[in-house]
Amino acid sequence: MTSVLYDVPGPKARRRSLVISVVGTVAIVGGLVALLMFLAAPRTNAGGVQIAGMLDPSRWDLVLDRAVWRVVWRGLLGTLQMAGVAAVGAIILGIVLSMARTARSALVRIPAGIVLEFFRGMPVLLLMLFTLLAFSTGTYWAGVVALILYNGAIIGEALRAGVASLPKGQRESGLAIGLTPLQTRFSIEFPQAFRQMLPIIIAQLVVLLKDTSLASILGYPELLVVVVRQGPTTFGSKYLFTLFFICLFVYLGVNLLLSWVARIIARRTGSDYVRKRGRWIKKDNDPSLGIAKVPDAGMGGGGGAV
């Protein structure tokens, strides 16, 4: 089937695309091989003594030590404690800011907009340092407060955009049945906006989790501090590279898990899916709902639901 967006590539274009793909693949594989060879090569320390390469088995026997994973768990627990409290606070603050940002009164809307833009433009680390130095909150609460303020502003702007994208008839229908503007916002507009922006909100919470590593500058015992900074003191400096990779893969695993959960939630809360017999399927693919797509009829044809 021909595409209406671009011409079908001819023999020369297909050959050029194949050559570019082969060259790109070879370059990527060559770069990975060069990196592995560089990491595996022996090193010479400051004293002129040759030490084993980063991929030497003597540097990786630490992975089988249970004490290492107890340390990793302690650091991960500190990270999750900060991220969990900050996530709840950021969602609550985002809801409040979005409500104030969409208020009819300019006395509420304009200051809320200034506050929202201010915290959106502030670096998270600077907020952490300011909170710690100005209020002597301790490293934990300095990190939590900074993450709440920054991510709450981002979530608030996302919710405001979600409310603004709704048809005006949603609000008018609520007012027509006797609801107050506030009741209409909470009962009709806001639930739809929250569902629409849920993938963005969860993606921002993934960013929040990664930003907890900035609290390492303050000395808070989160994953990066406990594993990478304190780990070599406990297990030996030769394991620094190993501990770095353990920390990297733990962060990667947690973030991939959250992203997977975000995709599931986005799919199950989306308007294009329906639950039937324990499975989530697209409405377009469910004949029992009376929805089907008309196949394309070429360049001049269109599709629609019948």
Image (cartoon, rainbow, N blue to C red):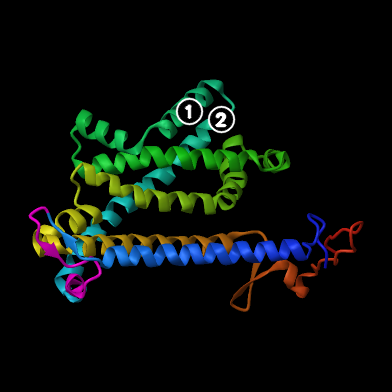
- Taking the spot 66% from the left edge, 59% from the top edge, the residue there is 271
| 55 to the left or right of 7 | left
**Residue at 79% in and 54% down:** 5
Q: Residue furthest right?
A: 300
Q: Which residue is mark 1?
A: 112
Specify the amino acid type for callout 1: Ala
Q: Give percent across and percent down for residue 53.
A: 21, 66
Pick out the residue farthest to the left. 47
How many numbered tags mark residues here?
A: 2
Task: Indicate the amino acid at tag 2.
Answer: Ala
Q: Quadrant of the C terminus?
A: bottom right
Residues at marks 1 and 2, CA–CA distance in whole angstroms = 9 Å
Q: Which mark is residue 153?
A: none
Relative side of 288 to 238, left or right:
right
SS class, disc 1? helix
Whether label 1 touches label 2, CB < 8 Å: yes
Image quarter of residue 237: bottom left
Residue bounds of the magenta highlight: 46-62
Nearest to the observer: residue 236 or residue 134: 236
- Residue 124, compared with residue 68, is above or below; it is above
- Report crowding for label 2: few under 14, some 14 to 19, many 20 or more residues within 10 A (C-alpha): some
Residue 116 rendering spot, x and y as whole percentages: 46, 31
Is residue 79 shown in magenta? no
Whether residue 6 is visible: yes
Which marked residue is nearer to the observer: mark 1 or mark 2? Answer: 1
- Residue 47 colored magenta? yes
Q: Which residue is disc 2 drawn over?
A: 103
Binning the other alpha carbons within 10 Å of mark 1 as few (below 14), some (14 to 19) or many (20 upward) gives many
- Does residue 222 appear left or right of residue 181 in this picture? left
Q: Secondary structure at mark 2?
A: loop
Q: Is residue 184 visible?
A: no
